[in-house]
Image (spheres, rainbow, N blue to C red):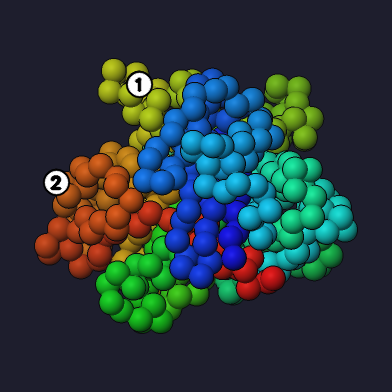
Amino acid sequence: MKILVINAGSSSLKYQLIHMETEEVIAKGTCERIGIDGGKLTHKAHGETFVIEQELPDHTAAISLVLKELVDAKAGVIHSMDEIDAVGHRVVASGEAFTKTTLVTDEVMETMEVIKELAPLHNPAAILGVNACRAVMPDKKMALVFDTSFHATMPPYAYLYGIDYDDYKQYKVRKYGAHGTSHKFVSQAAADYLKRDVKDLKIVTCHLGNGSSISAVNGGKCVDTSMGFTPLAGVPMGTRSGDIDYAAVEFLCRKKGMSMAEGLTYLNKKCGMLGISGVSSDFRDLCAAAEQGNERAQLALDMFAYSCKKYVGSYMAVLGGLDVLVFTAGVGENTPTVREGICEGMEAFGIKLDKAKNNFKNDGSIRDLSAEDSRVKILVIPTNEELVIARETAALL
Ligand code: ADP
């Protein structure tokens, strides 16, 4: 059985074609900088890397290019789409509409349209991904795998907002979290790497990418997470504000003449690293600008590390200690200065980073960055949401 996994993010789209009997990745790749200039597809197959530089104005363009590449005479790995048994799609938010992996039907997609507002940057991308695949492969079975499932174990005192309880009951307004598939994968992978039972570990997982979330995982179960009702909450992100006082939002809307909907678009697309730096939402651009002395780029990076550090500290309090701190995703795996900024000054809490080990170039392997005398293990674990999604899709079929 071969499963094609589509993970459509806000500015990137990752895919893997996985042979399920061996869990071998037959081909994989990433479309980067979707919707911003400098679009690029990096496709890996047959031990070779194929790079196509092509503007990718939207996710439909990205998926079309991926499918073309999979059957390409040179870079391809299959002769036709018939060789793909099913497609598994990552979906960020489900609210309470879906609590587990779900088969794609017209009715399900109608519900997806209704709940897309829960993750305005991601769910529309996932819908585009599903629709593009259904158009090209109309008979193919497809599954939606939701990020929110892993966070279902949060206790009510962690997921509730301080609003009227009846409003929570009626409108289901509460914290749902996101990136659950990634937090689940890396917390289990950390336990496996340390040869420990995940049930015995207190872990904080930092999924830091264009969108970022941090989770407290106790004994393999999520007990709190930084994202909220939507992925807008938590640390400041590529283009999202992260946590903000609602009164400040209302004030800004009034001053700038924005409607509530415009205010939400502003908070999702024009804020965060992009808004603070005025340079870019992309951490590579930010690091390059900061190195050249751009003070606002440096300020954005400092804000990001500071905010992440506060979550790590508060989750140590939630967990009553910490055994493992995990970094993952685009920024967590590739940006030493961000990891250093988060760990800086945390020695009193047992977090001691080995700076030499921290300055490695990501090669896809798990890295232990802890200093010899660090009480807490500090690990970089490349996330593998795709494998979790493929397993879930295969199990559903
Ligand atoms: P998302 O899936 O939320 O779009 P990613 O996890 O792909 O995000 O992370 C994208 C971020 O990771 C970008 O800000 C990018 O600058 C940063 N990054 C830094 N170094 C690298 C790298 N070598 N490869 C990919 N992303 C990187």
Q: Secondary structure at mark 1?
A: helix
Q: Nearer the viewer, residue 368 or 144?
A: 144
Q: Is residue 128 left or right of residue 373?
A: right
Q: What residue does disc 1 label?
A: 289
Bin the neighbour count of mark 2 within 10 Å (Cα to Cα): few under 14, some 14-19, many 20 and up: few
Q: Is residue 89 above or below residue 168?
A: above
Residue farthest toward the left in the current orientation of the protein:
372
Q: CB under 8 Å between callouts 1 and 2?
A: no
Q: Is residue 17 above or below residue 396?
A: above
Q: Position of residue 397 (x, y in %)?
A: 69, 71
Q: Earlier in the sequence, mark 1 or mark 2?
A: 1
- Spatial CA distance of label 1 from label 2 is 23 Å
Q: Secondary structure at mark 2?
A: helix
What residue appears at the point 22 percent right and 44 percent down from the top-left corner?
Answer: 360
Q: What residue does disc 2 label?
A: 356
Q: Position of residue 191 (x, y in %)?
A: 34, 73
Q: Is residue 259 visible?
A: yes
What residue appears at the point 76 percent right and 22 percent down from the top-left corner?
Answer: 257
The N terminus sits in image quarter? bottom right
What type is the residue that disc 2 sits on? Ala
Q: Position of residue 10 (x, y in %)?
A: 59, 39
Q: Is residue 308 visible?
A: no
Q: Is residue 179 left or right of residue 267?
A: left
What residue appears at the point 31 percent right and 66 percent down from the top-left corner?
Answer: 324
Q: Nearer the viewer, residue 105 or 246?
A: 105
Where's ligand 1: which quadrant? top left
What type is the residue that disc 1 sits on? Ala
